[in-house]
Amino acid sequence: MRTIGLRVMVVLAGITVSLRADEPTRRTITPEDMVNIRAVDDPKITPDGKFIAFTVTEPADTNRPGSPGNADIWIVATDGKSSPRRFAFGPKQESTPRWSPDGKYLAFLSNRGQDDKTQVYIMPVSGGEADALTSMKEGVSLFQWNPDSRGVSILSSDTLTSAEATKLEMKDDEKVLDENNRHSRLYSVDLATRSITLLTKEDETVNGFDYSPDGLQIALAVSPSPSMDDVYYRPRLVIMNRDGSGRKTISDRCFGNIRWSPDGRQILHFCYKGKAGHLFPELVSPAGVRTSPLKEDYYGAVFEMEWNPGRPEILVSSQEGVQGIIGRLDYLTGKVDRLRSVGRPYTSYTNLSIDAGGASIAFVDASTSSPLDIWIMKADGTGARRLTDLNQYVTSLVFSPAERVQWTARDGEPIDGILVRPAEYRSGKSYPLVVLAHGGPAWGWWLGWSLDWYNWSQLLAGNGFAVLMPNPRGSACCGWKFADKNVEDWGGGDFNDIMDGVDYLIQHGIADSNRLGIGGWSYGGYMTEWAVTQTKRFKAAVSVSGLSNLTSFYGTVDIPTFMQWSLGGGLLERESLYVERSPLTFIENVRTPTLLLHGEADIRVPVSQSYEFYRGLKDMGIESRFVVYPREPHAIGERAHQLDLLERMLDWYSEHLRE
């Protein structure tokens, strides 16, 4: 890499910076950089706190089109005296590392067998080859060590009967909706004998579970069927004895993250809060007494929880405004004390692990210019140290400054967002602005690492654009009451919040009012399509997996209850609202050149939504382009498709927003 051969002075964001001769030159971020990041996830610390196992997913292999990046299990010592190393690896996928409570074994999931089914593998901590512990015909989706370390409990789906398998081979494979469900059931596997015992015989789907500390009872999240609508919106919390007897329901709408307290007196899990179904912590006793461990006015959204075995508190990962945090929740007072601010994505749900003594916390962290890595700190939040550096090449990239901005909406509501200034920003000059609307709507943008196929802020900023990432009402960042504020008001207050943020940046001389663009994925795609039907101010739009016709969407989405909660009822009850909040209803207003991108196998937002909007744009004679990605579900995953999406997006804005 070249270096600068003399001392020079540059101005960045109005600040004069001196570059030394030995400082390496840096280059603009490219789409290739964004898909070449190693993903780090799921840290699990040993009971004695000496090692951390974690998953590293490599970038997809360019020689294997359509294949996902290879995931391996790595290990690193918490004292930082040795480099991280691969521990369980191979050409197939390895993930979900879990230490046995006695610290003697590491178990993990892998599809390394000949049938390519995901099974539980186990290997001694002292080393040696991994041994397959399970051989379930339908594989294993989730597992957990039993408290005595003598076995594991697993979730696996029902297998086809011989008659069903024969029909399938003969292509006699018709599907009847809501019938013949293949449930996910709980089994126990003995480590010594490899014998398997079915624990749940009821015709219901088990989605998560946890053992009581003494191993005598199990708490289960169950739903009537394996359909996503039932899993998301009709789950219950059930407890039973370890042999499956003595079942009883102790809470409804249990959305997972089940954690039995160290003293066995309470079970921690997520329930739903408010009209929008905001995830909220709940404590329930084995007798069914329910309490809330978190104050109702908490300004944030909790998305991960772990008990501290050393003291009566709960560790949480949450987002407060635009800032991710690791906090300590005192469940007696309901107060969250911030232990550390973090810069990892809101989408990362397996962040925390604490040792058996409650002394050390392993976690994942990142910053605006540094991807996810493994960190360690004391349980009080002090002594934080980074233990891995698995994407060192990013030091050669130019990252643009990102900052929190806040404006007052037209009705007085304070709204948070993130402003990413162009890499070569000069004070007093206005720039083309792209608004990135987030998905959800109960989601939120964060200050931190933001190179991903759905987060284009750094890529755009490196190419001369200012980027606004707003968290309007309805976002999951500022408490459940804030998340409820766009219920029955899609495209109303949240759209006004976004436009007020645009005007705020124009008034401050940052955004050029004549060069405005908008884009987003999922609900962000909906907001993009809604925006271009409500205003002619945007000169370019990019909608990824967006919604255009809420009436047809209700009949095709895999989670119709989501729409019932969001719009105050189903299509029969609220047809007029479905129509009046559909972008397609106002297609005649569109004047904005629009790029549509969608996965062909998307069942969350069916690709027909983009077909409908594209047909409307073409009928109107609006400049538009529609790209369909074969095999892709709601999240675009294949490397070539991600590259194509990023390149097309950048080209579209560059073509329509440049001077």
Image (tube, rainbow, N blue to C red):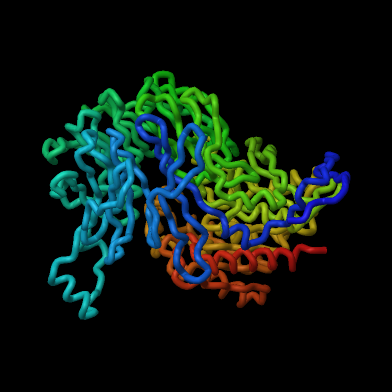
Q: Nearer the viewer, residue 113 or 468?
A: 113
Q: Looking at the image, is 213 positioned above or below residue 576?
A: above
Q: Residue furthest bottom?
A: 170
Residue 148, x across and y down, in percent: 21, 34
Which of the image's four quarters has the N terminus? bottom right
The residue at the point 70 percent across, 59 percent down is: 517
Q: Nearer the viewer, residue 284 or 208?
A: 208
Q: Nearer the viewer, residue 332 or 215?
A: 215
Q: Along the horizontal axis of the image, is 577 left or right of 228?
A: right
Residue 260, picture quadrant: top left
The residue at the point 53 percent across, 37 percent down is: 319
Residue 336, x across and y down, in percent: 49, 25
Q: Looking at the image, is 34 positioned above or below residue 474?
A: below
Q: Nearer the viewer, residue 297 or 150?
A: 150
Which of the image's four quarters has the C terminus? bottom right
Q: Along the horizontal axis of the image, is 158 left or right of 334?
A: left
Q: Along the horizontal axis of the image, is 196 left or right of 565?
A: left
Residue 58, x across and y down, in percent: 49, 57
Determine if residue 117 is in view. Answer: yes
Q: Looking at the image, is 355 positioned above or below residue 136?
A: above
Determine if residue 476 is in view. Answer: no
Residue 557, x across and y down, in percent: 40, 61
Q: Looking at the image, is 652 positioned above or below residue 505?
A: below
The residue at the point 76 percent across, 46 percent down is: 505
Q: Along the horizontal axis of the image, is 64 left or right of 500?
A: left
